[in-house]
Amino acid sequence: MILWESTDVPITLPPVLRNVSNEELIANISLPDNTVPEWSFTVFPCHTVAVERTVKLVTEAAFRVCGCDVRNGIIRSTLLSRQALPKFQSKSQFVTILPENGDSD
């Protein structure tokens, strides 16, 4: 559940409405009854990258275990472990550490 009163929850526009002005939105919402608004959407994504990551995570968790509580526990622990990992702004900051002799053992 989302606590809308919380200040640390970012509220963003849905991707489909990012290019719609407030005036156009209000005009289409306030049409008389039985009037279908005409939207001029161009190509828009049906999912964001975050949604796709979440769907993948839930699907993988559902394949691994049975039961809602266990699945939710795996999802939460995965998200917590991802938060503990360092965040990089670019690929140049990512450095792999290899053994000195070149072996991968």
Image (cartoon, grey):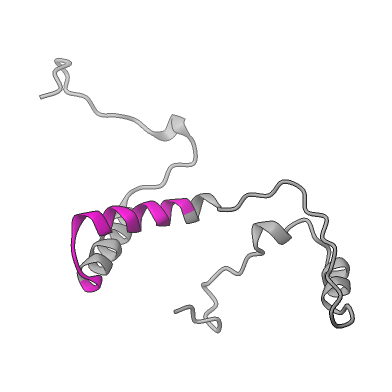
In the foreground, 63 or 89 = 63
The answer to whether 39 appears left or right of 49 in the picture is right
The answer to whether 95 appears left or right of 36 in the picture is left
**Which quarter of the rendered picture does the C terminus lie within?**
top left
Image quarter of residue 33:
bottom right
Q: Give x and y (percent) for residue 72.
A: 27, 68
Outermost front residue: 34
Image quarter of residue 101:
top left
Residue located 45% across and 29% down the image: 92
For the record, the magenta segment spans: 52-69
The answer to whether 33 appears left or right of 71 in the picture is right
Residue located 89% across and 73% down the image: 27
Residue located 88% across and 69% down the image: 23
* Residue 54 lies in the magenta stretch: yes
Residue located 84% across and 79% down the image: 34
Outermost left residue: 105
Q: Is residue 3 above or below residue 52?
A: below
